[in-house]
Each structure stands twice: as structure tokens, then as C-alpha cells.
Image: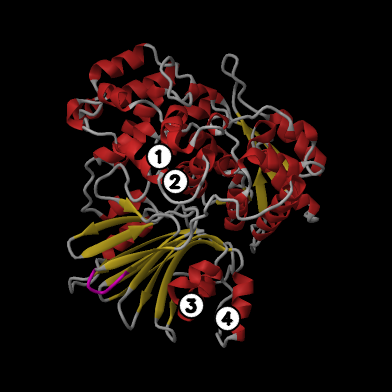
């Protein structure tokens, strides 16, 4: 797990090494254990390293294989790298390190861009071919590792974070009006390739982009689960299949040359990860949970459940209570760690949790993704019996934050759009072949888009802000493929995630399996008051916010007068949504 950056010129100019140095330096917290720069003609690469696999200097990057004529920068982990290495060695490859990074190089030399089909892991990487000058960029199937792009005259820059591109300079920081519409429609999600900034794009998940020496490029999308019934099993067999596939996913994510812990919320998903590791015989497993002060009737922690699980499996458990005095400063720190604005208050919780966990450990497994993959959210059941031809309307009712007309009310006229690009985006996805039922179509969209640009991005940004690697076994691509084939009624059973709950029986205490669904609680942000409300007011009503002319002043004043009244379709605080965007724009200097 690391951060990388680079520049590729096709106009005959040499790469701007100073710009790559600035981008790389800006990501020092993603990779506190080392750094490197490599340049050759029109290409330069930079890397910040977090040592997880092969802790020696042989695993340092940028990694250059002179014999193959390939140079690499890579962020992530290839969990099956040992198996791939053995296969490559049988084919005649020789290795100078014990790293997964070198396996990528040798795999690319052996199989070309189709090497990604063989990788089980989370990754983003850039490979430069010495002989051709070709640049290849790739991103893992679920977009767990980010890759941002900024194109200029005759050149392309790329980096693991959006702020790194801004550190290089010469980026159009105007707002993209369509991306703004998406942000206000999809709980801050801006689907790839857009970002809220007009001059920055992101490589879509499950994509390999090949950029030729003349600047022309082409993409290969190498993975897209069909969400169709490709497997026929009984209900009990489905539970067994999910259990076994998750066991493999958890085992894969234990691969490291450093200890691996677990972020234990006390919910089903993280508890099941702990159960799998305990069943595999892991002793002294470090687990961590976080809690905050209660606000009104909202509890600030779920320690009762995480303590139960920790006791049941005998983990080395740390219960982390965050004093209220730390929460307000953490808001700005979390915003500063965001590559894109993220409205979920979970981001602040993850940022604080990661700070504490990173003092003890470098790698953790986490339960993110299970709700999107196994239909755990409350907006899925209403879609169960909706005819496919009514799917877009039904999805919009339960998921889209607000109608298009309400966005016109929120925004100043300069940002009004005549059509509704967010609804059109949903309609386009729902019209794709496959996904015969409305629920299948919704899960396909959420898995390929919403999951990538909300919880997955949140985990990456907040953990990496403290040099902590977060691994997400529920997003193992083979587990996701299995879940996509699972009949919808099995996922919706037992109040949601039914097949996963069935798989957990006998492994996880029933009190955890049958508990009401919980959320990562940060009550002080969900209900804005006191200094948190003043911080929001400062962002929206200060000189910079007023000068931007983004939101209608009357709308903003109405929100500030009644800060906790207006909620989005899914119950998010509307004031926090608009304020978070302005806070992030000010943080990155846009």
C-alpha cells in the first residue's frame, strides 16, 4: 500500500521531474517508509512506500527491470502473488525481490495487459515500456485503489490522490456542473470518470488504459459481474458457498510480512471476519473499535457488541473512546485527507480510528462492502417486486437524494442544468444487458459505482492518511461474483443480508447476527449544533463561500436557521452535504 504519481509526454518534451517530485511529496502520509523518483525522456514516475510485503530495499519503487525494459509504480496488494510467482518461475522468470510489485512486472511481461485477469487483490499501477514508450495504467476490479488523471497540452499526469495533481500545478479547478449534480444526487458520489473538478478525471474501476507514444489511448474493461442466475444451488448450499468463499477472501487478506488486525465494529460483517480468522487458528489477533459521546437519543458507540465478539474469540481488543474535544479538529483533518468530498460522517470516524490504530499496527481487515454486495440496506426491499420497466423510477424514489427540480432551488442560476444527468446516468446503467430483476440492476449499479466512490474510497483515504492499509474481504472479486449470482430473495431474507447471516450461523454469536442493523455513529455531525454548526456557517457564509456563488443564499440561510430539519432521501443532513463540499473546495484551494 503506497502512493504514486507520474507524468507522460507525447509532444517531444522531457517530463517535468519537479512536478512529479511535488506530487510524490504531497503523499508522504500514504507511504512514510520510503520514496523514489525515476525519469527517462518524456516519462517520470514517483512513489511513496508503505512497507507491507518484502520489507527490504529490493521491494522499493519505482521498480525497474532492466532486462525486461519495464518500469513500475504500484499501490495496493496482490494477494495471490506467491502462487503467480511460482507459475512465472516455472515459465522461466527470475526474480530479484520477494515483493508482489515484481510479480506485476513479470506478469505483464508474460501476459501483457491481460495480466490483471490473474490478479486477486486491490491495485492501481503504471507500467512504462522502454522499447515502445507505451504507458499502461490499471485499476482493480472494485476500484479499491484510486487513480486520478489530469491531462494538459501534450501530456498526462496521474496520481493516487487528487490533491497530488493539484500540487503539480496547472490544473483546471473549475467545478464540473454535471459532477456537481451527481454529488447532490448520490450522497457525494461522483461516478468515474468525472470528479467535481473539471480538470481532473479518474480511471474507472476494472479498467486498463494503454497510452501510446503519440498520446492516443484505448481502454479495456476486464470485469463486470452479470448479476444473473449463473449458479443453481439450494438455500443451504448458497450459505455454504458464501461461507467458503468468504473464508478464502479473509485468508488472502492475511498475506503480509507484518501483523494484520481487524476493525471490529460489533456488526455482523466485521465479526464474521474475526470469526474466520479465529477459526483459522490465529491467536493474539488485534481488534479495534471506536465510540463517541452520546447526543440526545443517539448512542455514540456499539461497544456492547464489539466487546461481546472480542471476548468470544479472545482477541487483543482495544476499545477507543474519542473525547468530544477531539471531534471538531478531526473534521477539518478528515476533510484534508479526502481526495474528493465525502459527505458521510463515517469519514471522520474512520480518520480518528485510523490515527489510533496506526500507532499499533500497519494492516487491518474491515467489513466494508457487505451491505452493497449482499443487499443489507433498507432501500433494497422496496425494489424486490418492482417490474423491470419501472426500475429507474423505483430506484430514484428510494436512493436519489432529491428531485432534479429541488437542485434548481438549491443552486444559483449559473449552475442550473436543463436536463437531469443523474437520472440519465441511472437509466443508462439500468438499460445495460443482464440483471433481469430490478433488485439485480440496483445491486449491479451500487456495486460497480456507488460502492467504489463512497465506502471504498472513504476507507482508502482515511486509513492511508495515517499510513494504515485497509483490506476489505467482502470485496474479493470472486465473492462479489458469487453474490451477484445469488437469488435476490436469499439476500433480502432475515431483514437483509439473509444468505450472509445464514453463512454466519454457528460461527458468530446469534446476538450479533440478529441485532438491529447499526451504523458507524458520529452523532455530533449527524445533528449539527454548537461549534460544529459554527464551522459549517463559516464555510458557507465566509468570503470564499459567498464569492463562489454556488448555493442560493436564501436556501443556505434557511438551512442554517433549522440545521437539522432537511434530510436527503436516505436521511443525511442536507446542511452537512452542502457545507462539506464548500469546506473541501476551500481546503484544496479550488
Q: Which residue is mark 2?
A: 449
* Crowd tier of the residue under label 1, counting other residues whose Cα lies within 10 Å: few below 14, some 14–19, many 20 or above: many
Q: Which residue is mark 1?
A: 189
Which circle's residue, 4 or 2, is located before the other in the chain?
Answer: 4
Q: CA distance from mark 3 to mark 4?
A: 10 Å
* Crowd tier of the residue under label 3, counting other residues whose Cα lies within 10 Å: few below 14, some 14–19, many 20 or above: few
Q: CA distance from mark 1 to mark 2?
A: 8 Å
Q: Which residues are magenta?
A: 211-215
Which circle's residue, 1 or 4, is located before the other in the chain?
Answer: 4
Which circle's residue, 3 or 2, is located before the other in the chain?
Answer: 3
Q: Which residue is mark 4?
A: 88
- Residue 141 vs residue 150, the one in the foreground: 141
In the rendered image, residue 557, in percent from the top left (x then y), is placed at 29, 15
Q: Are marks 1 and 2 in contact (CB under 8 Å)?
A: yes
Q: CA distance from mark 3 to mark 2?
A: 28 Å
Q: CA distance from mark 4 to mark 2?
A: 34 Å
Task: Give the left or right position of residue 150, taking residue 49 as reference.
Answer: left
Tell me, yes or no, if residue 12 can be seen here.
yes
Task: Name the outermost residue toward the top.
Answer: 561
Instruction: Residue at 31% x, 52% y: name it.
Output: 201
Amino acid at each position: 500500500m503506497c502512493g504514486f504519481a507520474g507524468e507522460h509526454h507525447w509532444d517531444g518534451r522531457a517530463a517535468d521531474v519537479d512536478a512529479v517530485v511535488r506530487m510524490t511529496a504531497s503523499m508522504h502520509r500514504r507511504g512514510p517508509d520510503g520514496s523514489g523518483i525515476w525519469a527517462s525522456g518524456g516519462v517520470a514516475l514517483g512513489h511513496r512506500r508503505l512497507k507491507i510485503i518484502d520489507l527490504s530495499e529490493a521491494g522499493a519503487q519505482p521498480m525497474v527491470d532492466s532486462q525486461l525494459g519495464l518500469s513500475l509504480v504500484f499501490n495496493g496488494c496482490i494477494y495471490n502473488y506467491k502462487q503467480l510467482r511460482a507459475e512465472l518461475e516455472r515459465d522461466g522468470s527470475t526474480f530479484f525481490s520477494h515483493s508482489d510489485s515484481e510479480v506485476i512486472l513479470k506478469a505483464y511481461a508474460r501476459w501483457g495487459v491481460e495480466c490483471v485477469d490473474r490478479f486477486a487483490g486491490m491495485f492501481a499501477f503504471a507500467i512504462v515500456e522502454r522499447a515502445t514508450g507505451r504507458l499502461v495504467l490499471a485499476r482493480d476490479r472494485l476500484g479499491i485503489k484510486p487513480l486520478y488523471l489530469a491531462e494538459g497540452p501534450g501530456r498526462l499526469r496521474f496520481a493516487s490522490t487528487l490533491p497530488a495533481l493539484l500540487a503539480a500545478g496547472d490544473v483546471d479547478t473549475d467545478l464540473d456542473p454535471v459532477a456537481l449534480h451527481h454529488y447532490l444526487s448520490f450522497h457525494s458520489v461522483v461516478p468515474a470518470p468525472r470528479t467535481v473538478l473539471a480538470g481532473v478525471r479518474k480511471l474507472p474501476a476494472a479498467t486498463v488504459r494503454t497510452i501510446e507514444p503519440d498520446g492516443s489511448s484505448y481502454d479495456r474493461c476486464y470485469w463486470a459481474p452479470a448479476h444473473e442466475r449463473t449458479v443453481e444451488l439450494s438455500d443451504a448450499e448458497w450459505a455454504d458457498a458464501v461461507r467458503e468463499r468468504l473464508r478464502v477472501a479473509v485468508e488472502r487478506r492475511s498475506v503480509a510480512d507484518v501483523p494484520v488486525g481487524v476493525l471490529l465494529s460489533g456488526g455482523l460483517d466485521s465479526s464474521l471476519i474475526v470469526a474466520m480468522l479465529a477459526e483459522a487458528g490465529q491467536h493474539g489477533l488485534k481488534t479495534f473499535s471506536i465510540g463517541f459521546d452520546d447526543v440526545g437519543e443517539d448512542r455514540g458507540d456499539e461497544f456492547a457488541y464489539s466487546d461481546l465478539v472480542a471476548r468470544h474469540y479472545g482477541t487483543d481488543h482495544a476499545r477507543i473512546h474519542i473525547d468530544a474535544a477531539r471531534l471538531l479538529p478531526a473534521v477539518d483533518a478528515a476533510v484534508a485527507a479526502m481526495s474528493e468530498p465525502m459527505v458521510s460522517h463515517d469519514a471522520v470516524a474512520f480518520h480518528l480510528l485510523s490515527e489510533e490504530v496506526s500507532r499499533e499496527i500497519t494492516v487491518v481487515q474491515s467489513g466494508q462492502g457487505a451491505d452493497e454486495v449482499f443487499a443489507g440496506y433498507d432501500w433494497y426491499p422496496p425494489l424486490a417486486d418492482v417490474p423491470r420497466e419501472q426500475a429507474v423510477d423505483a430506484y430514484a424514489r428510494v436512493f436519489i437524494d432529491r428531485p432534479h427540480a429541488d437542485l434548481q432551488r438549491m443552486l444559483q442560476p449559473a449552475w442550473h442544468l436543463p436536463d437531469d444527468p443523474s437520472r440519465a446516468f441511472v437509466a443508462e446503467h439500468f438499460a445495460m444487458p443482464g440483471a433481469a430483476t430490478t433488485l439485480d440492476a440496483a445491486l449491479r449499479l451500487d456495486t460497480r459505482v456507488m460502492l467504489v466512490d463512497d465506502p471504498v474510497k472513504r476507507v482508502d483515504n482515511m486509513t492511508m492518511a495515517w499510513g494504515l492499509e485497509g483490506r476489505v474481504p467482502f470485496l474479493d472479486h470472486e465473492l462479489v461474483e458469487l453474490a451477484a449470482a445469488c437469488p435476490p430473495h436469499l439476500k433480502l431474507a432475515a431483514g437483509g443480508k439473509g444468505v450472509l447471516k445464514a453463512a454466519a450461523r454457528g460461527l458468530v454469536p446469534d446476538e450479533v447476527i440478529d441485532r438491529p442493523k447499526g451504523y458507524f455513529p458520529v452523532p455530533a455531525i449527524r445533528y449539527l449544533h454548537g461549534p460544529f454548526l459554527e464551522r459549517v456557517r463559516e464555510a458557507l457564509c465566509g468570503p470564499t463561500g459567498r464569492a463562489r456563488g454556488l448555493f442560493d443564499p436564501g436556501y443556505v440561510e434557511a438551512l442554517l436557521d433549522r440545521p437539522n430539519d432537511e434530510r436527503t432521501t436516505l436521511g443525511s443532513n442536507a446542511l452537512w452535504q452542502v457545507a462539506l463540499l464548500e469546506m473541501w473546495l476551500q481546503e484544496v484551494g479550488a
